[in-house]
Structure formats: C-alpha cells, structure tokens
Image: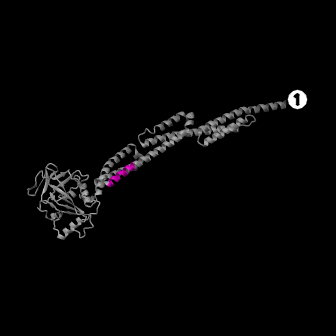
Amino acid sequence: MSVYQYLEYTVLAAHTLPEDLSSYDVIVISTPTTLYEDDSLQAIKKYVESGGGLLLMAEENNKDGTTLVINQIAQEFSITFNVDRIFDQQYYLQHTSWITLTAFPEHPIFEGIRTVVYTSGCSLVSDGGVLLQTTDSAYAQKYDGIATYEKGETPGCMVIKEVGDGRVVACGDKELFDTYSPLGDNTLFALNVVDWLAGSEPRIRERLLYKQEAAELIPKAKLAVEAAKEKGLQEVFPRSVEMAESLIVEAETLYNAYDYFGSHQKAMQARDFILDGEGQAEALVQEKTDQAHICLEAIEKAAHQYLPSQLEAAQYYFQEIESQATYNQRIEKADEALQRCEEIRSELRGAAENEIAAAEEKIQSYRGLFGRTLHHSARVHLENATDSYEKGEFGDAILMAKQSQDFSDQAAEAQKKDYILLVGIVLVAILGLYILLRK
C-alpha cells in the first residue's frame, strides 16, 4: 500500500528527471540506480534553492553495499546516507530492524505523530538541519556485521532541512512511505512530510484539527443514532436512521483513508440527519398532541356534564402521552385520546340534534293566544341552540335546546287558557241562545 494514494496532489511517476522542474511542488527520488549527470544535479539543486521540495529516500543498501547514487544527490545538500542498517533490541515491532520511534524534535512534520516505525532502514548524517535520532538502545551495522554505531550513540535516521527558499527531507527507509506505511503513524507522518515540502504547513495543522474533531464526532454520531433508535425514530422516519448509519460508515472509511476533512463532514451530516429526523418526529408528536388537546378543550365542559366517564377515559390517554418511551407510542396515545374525543363529540352532536329537533317540534305545535312571551323565549333559545350547534358547541346547543323546550312546555301550559276561554265563550253563546229561544 502506498501513501501516495492519500495525497491531495497530482502524483506523476517518471523514471527520468523532467527537463523543467519548476512546475512541480515536490520531487521524490527513491533509491536511484543510475548516476546523474552534473547538469541534472545542478538542476535539482537550483530547483530546491528556488523554493522546491525534495524527498530523498534510501534503504539499508547492504545487499549491494553502496549508496553511491543517492549520496550523489544528497551530498549536494550536505547529507550522507550510510551503508548500514539500524537495529533496536528494546524498541521494535516484530523485528529488531523494525524500530519504533516515539520521541521527535519540534517540527511541523511531527505534529500529531505518536509513533513512526522505521523498517530496515539505514542511518545518515547531515551538516545542519533537524536530525531525527533513534533511541539509546539503537545501534547500526553494515551488511557484513561491522558496527557503524554502537548502542548509546543514537544513530540518525532522517534529516529535515531548509536550503535556500526550498526544503529537503532525507529518509533512510523508503518502505515507510510505501509497503509499511500502515504501521504506526507512518502514513500520517508521510502526508505531513509532503505537505511541508510543498510549503503547505497549514494543511498539516488543518489535517490534525479535523482528525481530532472527526475522532470525537464519529462516536457522538453513533451515540446519537442509538439514542434515536431507543426513541423509535426508525419507526417514524426510517430514512433518517438509515442515512445516518450509512454516513457514519463513510466517515469511518474516510478516517481510515486519512481524509479527515471528508470524515468530519460525513460525521456532521450523520448527526444532522438524526437531529432533523428527531425534530420532525417531535413536530409530528406535537401536532398529534395539539389536535387531541384542541378537541378535548372544545368538548370538556359538555362532556363533563353529559358523558363524564368517557371524558375521563379520553383525558387518561392524553395524560399518558409524555410518559411514553418512543415517538410511535406517544403518537398512539395522542391518536387514542383524539379518537375517544371524537366519539364523545359525535355523541354530543347526536344528542344536540335530538334536543334541537324536539325543541323545533314543540315550537311548531304552539297555536294559542296566551304564553306568547314564553313561546318567543323558546324560539330565541332554539336559535341560540342552532347557532351553537353550527359552531360545534354541542354542549351549549343541548342546554339551549332543553331550555327552549322548557319555555315551550310553559307556553303549552299557558295555551290551556285558550281552551278554557273558548269553552267559556261557547257556554255563554249557548246560554244566550237558550234565553232567546225561551222568549
């Protein structure tokens, strides 16, 4: 696996040195085998001094016993790769020649780096620059076993230096950037190296910032998803949960691919999907709750008087809404409260219709001279009952219709006087006729 796949640069591979180097941010020269012409060496040196970045990579070089070609270039910058291999019998990974480095000089390329695994690399020396040294327990020896550094001499393994307006990094382990880049923080370190060589130090700090933020945000997004599931979000808005889970997987994939900015963005999107989904779910619950509340408020007075037990049942379901664990359960309680409220409303509507019909019938049956004031009151109350019915105020409609009937009943009692008067008139007429006939 190569670190170059994670770079935010266009990577061009070439077996020969391009004639025009000025268009490149960084040039990487790894274990060359052919000596360079003097004009090529001068072109490289001029490129660096003019602001270019140069990465020189060697290897242990013990098998062929020479670092002649790489040193041909390195020595232009007062750097020398040694013909040896570094070992460490205390700080190593799998093999004593795979040494682990955890102490670093203060420099931008080491920001955020905890461990670099230096695999079968050589030592090097430099006149000036920042030298990354190994531990006190490290030593170096040639391929034939002859020591070049004893324990305690802390052989150097990497040089970082500025030359003119440009920058140079020399590393005695090319596999750190390639085959063994997944070990330790090798990949992150390699990305830092390239950014520093390209003069893009802000990218190093930005990468570290997003790395930290993504590392914090991904677990938070996962917790948010789990919390949303406990509240049943997937039952109400399943897409919110599905998208969030998918984005978290993408965030983890990007994080492992060192795209911390992309990882951070995906984790934020995952969190936002959950927040939006929960917001919609809460809005739906609130809508259902408001519907039930409005209905109960409208029928409470009448239901308390005419259907108290049914009202109590509806109010029980309404009061249970907030104590439910999931959105669906809260919605179900609100729907149940609303359904029972509508049933009460329907019964009250039917009762109001019956009372109004009875009031109308009694008003229509009135035919008299006495009780007209009562009859008028009956008609007024019937009109009020009808108005209340049309407004959905069925309790008031029932009350007004019953009062209308009471006035009609009183008018009916008064109407009996009409019959008495009529009988009296008839009797007087008969008596008058009788008297006339007797004469």
Task: Depth check: give the residue in front, 96 or 284.
Answer: 96
Magenta span includes 271: yes
Magenta-colored segment: predominant secondary structure: helix
Q: Quadrant of residue 26?
A: bottom left
Task: Depth check: give the residue in front, 186 or 289.
Answer: 186
Question: On screen, 10 above or below 438?
Answer: below
Question: Callout 1: helix, strand or loop?
Answer: helix
Quadrant placement of the C terminus: top right
Crowdedness near tag 1: few (<14), some (14–19) or many (≥20) residues, C-alpha within 10 Å = few
Task: Kindly identify the amino acid type of the residue bearing the numbered disc 1.
Answer: Ile
Residue where numbered disc 1 is placed = 435
Q: Quadrant of residue 400?
A: top right
Residue at 66% x, 39% y is 382
Colour convention: one colour
Residue 417 in sight from this viewpoint: yes
Residue 122 in sight from this viewpoint: no
Task: Depth check: give the residue in front, 49 or 28.
Answer: 49
Q: Is residue 242 left or right of residue 77?
A: right
Question: On screen, 206 above or below 402?
Answer: below
Quadrant placement of the N terminus: bottom left
Magenta span includes 23: no
Residue at 65% x, 35% y is 403
Please state the horizontal and vertical placement of residue 71, each as a whole percent of the image: 15, 63
Over which residues does the magenta segment extend? 261-274
Residue at 17% x, 70% y is 38
Q: Is residue 360 left or right of residue 286?
A: right
Question: On screen, 429 above or below 225?
Answer: above
